[in-house]
Image (spheres, rainbow, N blue to C red):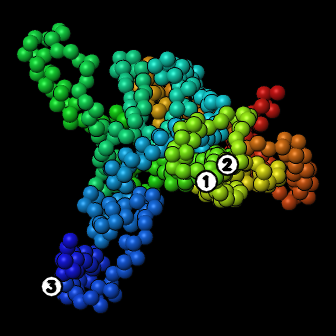
Amino acid sequence: MPSDFSLRSLLARRLAALSRRSGAVEPSLVAGPPPDERISEQYSPAILASGSTQEDWYWGRLASGGEEDYFWRRLCDNWYQKDPLPSTYLELHNLCYEAYNANPLAFAIIEITTSFVMGKGVTIAARDPRVQRILLDFWHDPENHMETRVYSLCTELALYGEQFIRFFVNPYSGRVTIRQIDPSLIDQIETDPDDVEKPLRFHCRPIGPSSCLESGRGLSASLSLDAGRESAAASLEGQWFKAGEEVLQFAINKVSSAKRGKSDLATLLPWLRRYKDWLTDRVRINKYKGAFLWDVRLQGADRKTIERKKMEYSYPPEPGSVIIHNEAETWSAVRPEINANEAAEDGRAIKLMIAVGAQLPEHYLSDGSYGNRATAAEMGLPTLLKFQRRQYVMRAMLRAILDRVLEEACRAGALAREVDRHYDIIFPEIEVTDHATLAGAVQMLVSALSAAKAEGWVSDETAMRLIFQFAGEEIDVHEEKGRIARRVGQL
C-alpha cells in the first residue's frame, strides 16, 4: 500500500506533466509535493471515478490507455495526427468484422449501402471501340471478375473504411489483374513529409513464412539455401509497396490530416453492442417470466420425513399429471416476481441512435410502425444523398483502376496513345420518383418557358438550361445546340 506522500508525489508529477503540455509550469509542482488544499484545487476524483464508455476508450481523452494514464500523453505520434493507435485500429477492424457477421443490424447497414450504391451493377461506355474492347476484356477477365468484385469493393470499403488495391501487370501483353489487400495487414503508411495526403509507400505486415517456395527445385543447394534465407527474412520483415505503382489506397470517413479511413460501423459499435445486450436481456426476462417451481409444505414433519420426501420428489411431476396426497402436504406453484414491464421505448431509443449514426431512416431497420408513406419519403432524402456521395467514391475508385488498365495497354502497344480514351462509368439511379408527377411538371415547365420566350423574357440557352437542370441532367447547352444544328443540316 503506497503512502500518502508517494501518492501526492505521483499526482504532482502528473500535474506537472499536464502543466508543461499547457505551457505553464509551476515551480511548486515540480519541486515537491503540493499541500493537500492545492491538490484539491487541481485534481478532482470525479475525473477518474466515473467509468469510461467504449466511445471514450477509442476516441476520447482516454484513447491513449487506461484511467491511470489520464494525465499522460502517448508517444506513438504527434498531436496533429488524427489516426488511432495501431492496436486500437486493429481492434476496431476486428470488432467491425465481428459485428458484420454476428449482429443483424450491422450486417443490414453494410448490405443496404451496397445494394443502394451498386444496385444491379455498373456499366462502362467508351467513345472509341478499341478502348471499349480493352476495358471489357479487363472487366470480364475471370481473374478479376469485376461483375461481382464491384460489390465486394463497396462492401469492404464500408466495412473497413478503406481499400488497398494491388496491381499485377503483364508487361508484354498489358494484361492487368487486381487483388484486394486486407487493410488489417497494412500497418504503416509513409507519406510525403510536406503533404500527408500524398502516400509514398505502404508496408504490409509479415504473415509468416510462405510454404509455396520449396528449396531445392531448379537451384543448387547453396542458391536454394540463400533464397530460403532471403525469403524467410522477407516474410519476417514484411513488404513495402510503392503507392500508385503497385498499390492504390481509397479511404472514407477520415479528415484530411489522417492516413487511415474509418468504417461506417466504427461510430455505431458501442450502440450496436448495447442494443444487442438489451435484446438479450429481454429474451432472458421473457423466458423466466413463464418459469415456476413447486413449493411442497409438510405439516408437522420431522427432519427424517422431510429427507424422505425430498428423495421421493427428486423428479418434478410431469405436466398434466395428477398429484395425490393427504392433508399433511400442501402443493403450490411459485413464479418469480420479475416485474418486467414493457420497455419498447427504451429499445427504440437505442435503435434510433444507431439509425442516426448510420444515416438510415427508422423504417429501413425493420421498424415501419412509427410513420406513414409521406414521412418515409421525406426521411429518405438524407439517406439517398449519402448513397449518391458513396457512388462518387466508387466511381473515383473504378476510374483509377480503369485508367491504369488503359495506361498499361498503351505501354504494351495494345492501344495507341493518340486514341480517345474517354469513357463513362454509369451507376444505377438511386432516386425513386413518381414518373407521372415528373412528366406533368416538365410539361408545365415547358409551357411556361415557351410563353416566356414568346414574350422575349428568356433566351433559348436559358430555357434549355432550366429544363435540363429540372430533369437533373448536366448537359452543355451550347454543345447540345450544335448537335441539333448538325442533325437538322443532315436532314
Q: Give the residue number, with chain letter if any, for mark 3.
A: 31
Q: Amino acid at mark 1?
A: Gly
| In this picture, residue 480 sits left or right of residue 161 | right
**Residue 75 at least partly seen:** yes
Residue at 53% in and 38% down: 311
Looking at the image, is mark 2 or mark 1 earlier in the sequence?
Answer: 1
| In this picture, residue 44 sits left or right of residue 99 | left
Residue at 28% in and 76% down: 18
Q: Say whether marks 2 and 1 touch (CB < 8 Å).
A: yes
Disc assigned to residue 84: none
| In this picture, residue 466 sits left or right of residue 272 | right
Q: Is residue 170 above or below residue 435?
A: above
Q: Disc 3 on helix, strand or loop? A: helix
Q: Between marks 2 and 1, how big is the CA–CA gap?
A: 8 Å
Task: Work out which residue is located at the far top of the displayed protein and give it.
Answer: 218
| In this picture, residue 240 sits left or right of residue 145 | left
Q: Is residue 436 above or below residue 423?
A: below
Q: Between marks 2 and 3, how big is the CA–CA gap?
A: 82 Å
Disc assigned to residue 300: 1
Q: Give the residue number, with chain letter if any, for mark 2.
A: 328
Dot in front, 2 or 3: 2
Residue at 9% in and 12% down: 221
Q: Amino acid at mark 2?
A: Ala
